Image: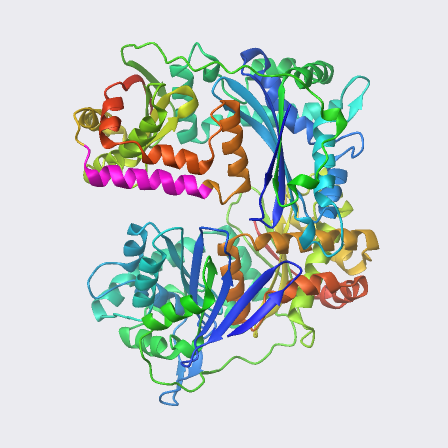
Amino acid sequence: MKIERMKSNKFKTNEIAIFLTMPLKKETITMNALLPAVLRRGTNKYPNQVEIGKQLENMYGAFFNCGIDKTGDNCILKFYIETVCDKFLPIDENLTQKAMDLINEIIFNPLTVDEGFCKEYVEQEKENLKKKIESRKDNKSLYSLNRCIEEMFENEPYGIYKYGNLIDLQEIDEKELFDYYKKMVNESEIYIVINGVDADKVEIPDSLDNHSVVNIKENEPLPKQEERIVNEKADVTQGKLIIGMSTPNDNRFAVSLYNAVLGGGANSKLFQNVREKASLAYSAGSKYIRRKDAIFIVTGIELQNYDKTLKIIKEQIEDIKNGKVTDDEFDKAKQLIISSLNLIKESQEDMIAFNYDQRLYGENLTVDEYIDKLNKVSKEKVIEVGKEISINTIYYLEK
Amino acid sequence: MQVIENKKIDEKVYIETLENGMKIIIIPKDNTKKKYIIWGTKFGSNDNHFIEPKTGKEIQVPDGVAHYLEHKMFEQESGVDSLYTLMALGLDANAYTTNDHTAYLFACTDNFYEGLDELMDYVQSPYFTDENVNKERGIIEQEIQRYDDEPIWKLYINAMNCLYKNNPITIDVAGTVESISHITKETLYSCYNTFYHPSNMIMCISGDFEPNTIVEEIKKRLKPREKMAEIKRIYPEYEPTINKNYIEKHMNVNMPLFMIGYRDFLQNENQIKKDIAIRIVFNSILGKCSKTYQDLYNSGLLMREMDCDFEFSNQYSHVLISGESRKPEEVYNTIIDKLQNEEISIEDFERSKKRIYGEFVTNYDDVEHVGRMFLADSIRGINSLDYIDEISNMNIEYVNKIRKEMLKKDEAILSIVK
């Protein structure tokens, strides 16, 4: 267990986050996806959502949320609670402690019936999760990106869909889920962070004693391979062309800048050349998944423009390799990343997520140190890493 | 410079009224990189009948002029659209028109002063020609038609038509295809010269600013204008009763929408206190944790929480409760009965009051929210900071009194879109 107190008087609220981290595995992902939804339904002290809701309102409209995420080859269950700082309350109260107690109650003291979760809650949340999995195709952009990730990391944990699968879901019952939950709590790494002006005032409940440590392996780059093309059909009016590329793991700051030059924002090569000049795409950009050493180019195009778009995208990748990056392109890309990094400091949730990621991977940089490292990257370095970046998977969702 | 302060939540607000009459409100936030500026004029769709101060002539303008003018303000003599110029600076820029004001704004982290140059330049440089005014007509017509197809918008306008007979709030902010056909370059200039005078405008700024410095920066960018007498607006007569109880419209929606409305006839009560009381009533009787909501949810009559708004200006004041239900009439009957007859318990009152207090305090973290709130409140003559103290001072007797006197069963209206 790790506890971090981030004292700050920047905000009117304090935020507590508790993250449970475990290895990402196909056998457990569906249960993991179901757990936060079941846990938030009721605890032994507050047996239903109305009682939890009343407690949140009594805590000056505290805000609670939870969910599941994947980072690298890890699965993370995330729980957050946000409350007004004690000094802004009309009467004296240790509200942050109450927040700690409530979030602790929700995660570690769920409503149980005969050594299992409440059957009604599990069945209802199974139904909700089922709808969520079934409707994943509704958001075509997100669906295509996730499908490309699944194809590219087919044989790796990262290729697992974070909300699980319908076959496993069907099998889950309230007893089995509860048994798994107890094991999971013991075996996962628990990280608690308290952000805000009252960070020091909060006592960590004794029940939260846990010694598990998740071992993070350094990410191995994917083996080099020929471009793999995956086509899928759906009822779409706009084609989704997603290109997965593997990136080197020894110079991530340069890759981050490479990504910004290629597809970050309105000044990037993809936006300028695919969307603006050639008018081939409705949207064109790229996304760097640092913890898996991959970049995904994401475009929405007219169906007949597949070949032309792919050709221009490849030209952009080649251009960077050949050093065709102007100082202006490079400076604007740098500016873009730095201003988005600076924005992290404006949100408690983003600060917490950034710090957690830094701790998890043992890098321990602050946002400013991180910006400093980025600032030191030269244009030449970006061109150099560009030579090591290659296309792995081309995914196309078409009609 | 006037300084107002709320020590409890550690907020200070600086207000400066310039010689030309323009009001500047600064809400400093020294620990954020985000900056927000919003410049509003007290000119909205309701201001369609007035006496022009310069000529003393009574003028009636076609519906939708304020919105038309907003569209045209971005057009510059250089041919470059100001919205584009602002976006190219990396700013999040926009404008909007409501019933009682029009506002031009941007949010940013960098390039604030470059943005300020452009914002203050374009709002002070109208450039209307017969050609560019005509060109816009088709674009606005499409916008009006798009709104006409929007179930939520229809639901709202129909509710207004139940609550009022002749109040301008019953008119679409953008006007009608017919009304905007009468708008010319001359109409726009006349409205611009009257309503875009500094004495009719308010600017709100939030972010890391030193109040005196920013006021000087604004003054530098203001163009000289002749003094102007007060604008006299002519409003229709106060309507002492609602217009009708019920209206429905068929639009083939998946799940019927409903909006329940009540006029606020309590003209002598403080608007802020009424606003807070209504929020407490709604949260206690119909909010997520209330028994009524739970019953409606469990019986499948509601799928999600309802919304409640207390809307007011110096010309209208009403409460709106809206949601979705497969049987809206049944929900309506339950709601109007509960609102009239259910005494709020002290437990529900205290809980709701705490929740609302927390929301108001938390909102002060967001420069955009703060800027927008101070502008909208200030247009209506309200000091936003008063809410914090009024929430703390609220008592249950007052809340139940407002509930009984404002939310009368036989004065409720129902608008449905099926």
Residue A56 appears at what percent x and percent y? 71, 43
User: Is residue B182 in view from this perspective?
Assistant: no
Scheme by which the image is coloured: rainbow
User: Is residue A59 in view from this perspective?
Assistant: yes
Q: Residue at x 30, y 33 (%)?
A: A263
Which secondary structure is most common in the magenta stretch?
helix
Q: Residue at x 69, y 67 (%)?
A: B273
Image quadrant in which you'd find residue B407:
bottom right
Residue B182 appears at what percent x and percent y? 32, 72
Relative placement, left or right, of B84 versus A39 is left
Tell which of A172 and B15 is nearer to you: B15
Count of numbered circles in the view: 0
> Does A333 lie within the magenta span?
yes
Image quadrant in which you'd find residue A396:
top left
Residue A270 appears at what percent x and percent y? 26, 33
Residues drawn in magenta: A325-343
Q: Which residue is drawn at 49% across and 65% down?
A: B26
Relative placement, left or right, of A219 versus A244 is right
In the displayed structure, A93 sits above or below A193; it is below
Tell which of B335 and B316 is nearer to you: B316
